[in-house]
Image (cartoon, rainbow, N blue to C red):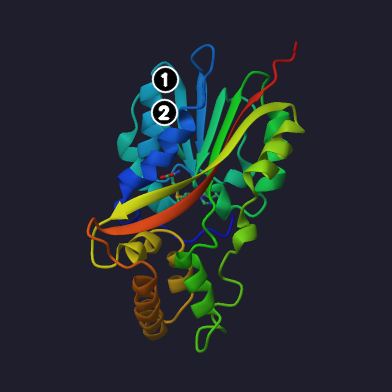
Amino acid sequence: MADSPSWDPEQYAVFGDHRTRPFLDLIAQIRPESPPSRVLDLGCGTGNQTEILADRWPEADVVGLDSSAEMLRTAERRSRPGLRFELGDINTADVSEADVVVSNAALQWVPEHRRLLGEWAESMRPGSWLAVQVPGNFDAPSHRIMRELAAEEPFAGPLRGVLRHEDAVDTSNAYLLNLASHGFIVDAWETTYSHVLQGENPVVDWVRGTGLRPVLESLRPEMRAEFETEYARRVRAAYPPADVGTVFEFRRIFFVGRKRPSTA
Ligand SMILES: C[S@@+](CC[C@H](N)C(=O)[O-])C[C@H]1O[C@@H](n2cnc3c(N)ncnc32)[C@H](O)[C@@H]1O
């Protein structure tokens, strides 16, 4: 399995609407000529987005795959004819039968995903679609502060090697060239969302659902509290509240490709 932390479905759902927006922007660019029969959502999490895929293509067999039993327990409540969920690892996923493969906000947890993309592209059917979104915010204050603090004492020892860096993902251009070299016609782009969040220190609450998890899990309880307090203080200073709320800028990287039909 990849080095993904354990997940808390409730915490992840706190900013659900904000997290769904990039997914909707992603799948808007999947435009098959005929409705797909098999749709795969890799790293489906709580499955709310997999359900959106099933609503869009009601005749399709839609499968959400995730390695987190906690996330899947929530996802499975959405199961219905045509929509099911499987426990599994993205690293060993078989995409060869799918007409549409989607992965939203998951491949940044899979260090081998660049190689996997090439393998998937080779094994996918002519005419099939691959749509991926990954965060491109590893240089944002929310993550930079986490890295800086993790490099300071007394955290440096227990947190050595725990945090991912900006090389966890590629640029949109690099993804485009990767897939294009395997016979895909690719549309790649980046978007920075300005999420307006409410709450006392909402950026910390957001990150608590994702990037902060492996850090806290690697610390003993007393050190965990110390890290959280100092991290929250620095993040609050970096994201001061405005009249409308706290604006959290979040850059994301998208690419959607269609495998060239074999006759082309
Ligand atoms: C940030 S969540 C995104 C969930 C969903 N796609 C969404 O956008 O709401 C990342 C998900 O990827 C899953 N994940 C990470 N590494 C994985 C792997 N190697 N195999 C399967 N799932 C993985 C995690 O368990 C988690 O549910």
- Quick check: marks 2 and 1 in contact, CB under 8 Å? yes
> For numbered disc 2, what is the local secondary structure?
helix
Residue at image location 48% in from the left, 61% down from the top: 5
Residue 7 shown left or right of residue 178 in the figure: left
Say few, some or many: other residues with alpha carbon within 10 Å of mark 1 (under 14 / 14 to 19 / 20 or more).
some
In this view, 51 is above or below 152: above
Q: Please name the amino acid that badge 2 sits on.
A: Leu
Residue positioned most to the front: 243
Residue drawn at the location 35% of the way across and 63% of the way down: 203
- Is 228 left or right of 169, judged from the image as shown? left
The quarter of the picture where the N terminus appears is: bottom right
Residue 264 placement: quadrant: top right
Mark seen at residue 53: 2
Question: Dot 1 corresponds to which residue?
Answer: 57
Q: CA distance from mark 2 to mark 1?
A: 6 Å
Return the x and y of residue 60 as percentages of the image width and height.
Answer: 45, 19
Q: Is residue 76 visible?
A: yes
Question: Residue flagged by tag 1: what amino acid is it?
Answer: Trp
The percent position of residue 158, horizontal first and vertical second, equals 54, 81
Image x and y of residue 145, in percent: 48, 73
Q: Residues within 10 Å of mark 2 (few under 14, many from 20)?
A: many
Q: Secondary structure at mark 1?
A: loop
The structure residue drawn at horizontal position 23% and vertical position 55%, both measured from the top left corner, is: 244
* Rendered image quadrant of residue 56: top left
Mark 2 Cβ and ligand 1 under 8 Å apart: no
Q: Residue at x 37, y 30 (%)?
A: 52
